[in-house]
Image: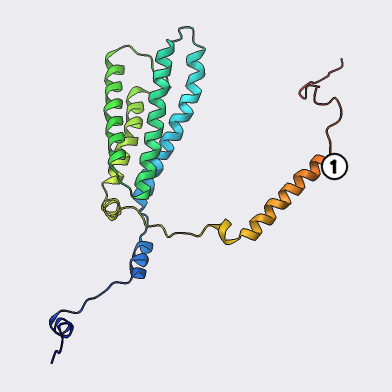
Amino acid sequence: MAISVLDVRDTFAAPRVRVPAVAAGETSAIRRLPVSIVAAGSIGVLEAVGLLAVGLTSLDDVMTAALRPAGWMVAGGLLVLSAWIVLCAGSGAAIIDGAGHKLLLGVACTELVLVSGLLVVFTLLPVANPTSLPLPALGLLALAVPVGKLLLVSTPAARQWLVAGPRVRAPRPDPVQSHRLLATLTLAVIGLALAGVAVLAPVPHGAASDPASAVFTQD
């Protein structure tokens, strides 16, 4: 028989089941990164690296061309290329982290529209092909990148990964705080080594005024 309000509550109420915090941590640690997510993120990062390489190699040709474009056109092209590189790399990193796929979908759809428009322009107008590949093969190769990213993101494993959200990272202690004595000794050793080099190997008098890159040859 219940003799108090607390006893009555405990008698008729259903027992509470508490999930320990360790179980949640173990569940998040069991998550495996799907192959499709790794492939989609890698395509985005590799595309950014490829765009950077193409931009660096093409900039010299543009600046040394006989008909060099105006400065505002060069600056605008560099700005668009930089934004494209950042978006490609950022979308690849975001999908691997599980933060979302909207950025990758937006970049891929924009690339599809851009490549399709360029193919139409190259087909209708007499524009010189900058590569040795035929135009249809070049178009299919360019379209394979955004189409591949869209197909990889739409797989069931990728959707499950994105629905689960970002991975929970366990907090790690600061190594400097954990090994303060070792960090202090390391800093002291580095300082003493630099001081010893400065004292034991002084710069010869007059060497600072001589050019270090001077090369003397004798015929």
Point out residue 20 in the picture as x, y percentages from the top left corner: 32, 72
Residue occupying the point 44% across, 59% down: 171
Q: Residue furthest front?
A: 4
Q: Residue furthest bottom?
A: 1
The colour mode here is: rainbow
Residue occupying the point 13% across, 92% down: 1
Residue occupying the point 15% across, 81% down: 9
- Residue 83, can we see it? yes
Point out residue 164 in the picture as x, y percentages from the top left corner: 29, 55
Point out residue 2 in the picture as x, y percentages from the top left corner: 14, 89
Q: Who is closer to the viewer here, 11 or 149? A: 11
Q: Amino acid at mark 1?
A: Leu
Q: Is residue 74 left or right of residue 200?
A: left
Against 181, is 8 above or below? below
Secondary element type, mark 1: helix
Point out residue 39 in the picture as x, y percentages from the top left corner: 38, 46
Against 136, is 30 above or below? below
The quadrant in which residue 182 appears is bottom right
Against 7, is 148 above or below? above
Packing grade of label 1 (10 A; few <14, some 14-19, many >=20) is: few
- Residue 133, can we see it? no
- Can you identify the residue that label 1 sits on? 200
Q: Who is closer to the viewer here, 125 or 186? A: 186
Name the image quarter holding the C terminus. top right
Looking at the rendered structure, the number of numbered marks drawn on it comes to: 1
Q: Who is closer to the viewer here, 103 or 66? A: 103
The quadrant in which residue 84 appears is top left
Q: Is residue 47 left or right of residue 10?
A: right
Residue occupying the point 47% across, 21% down: 58
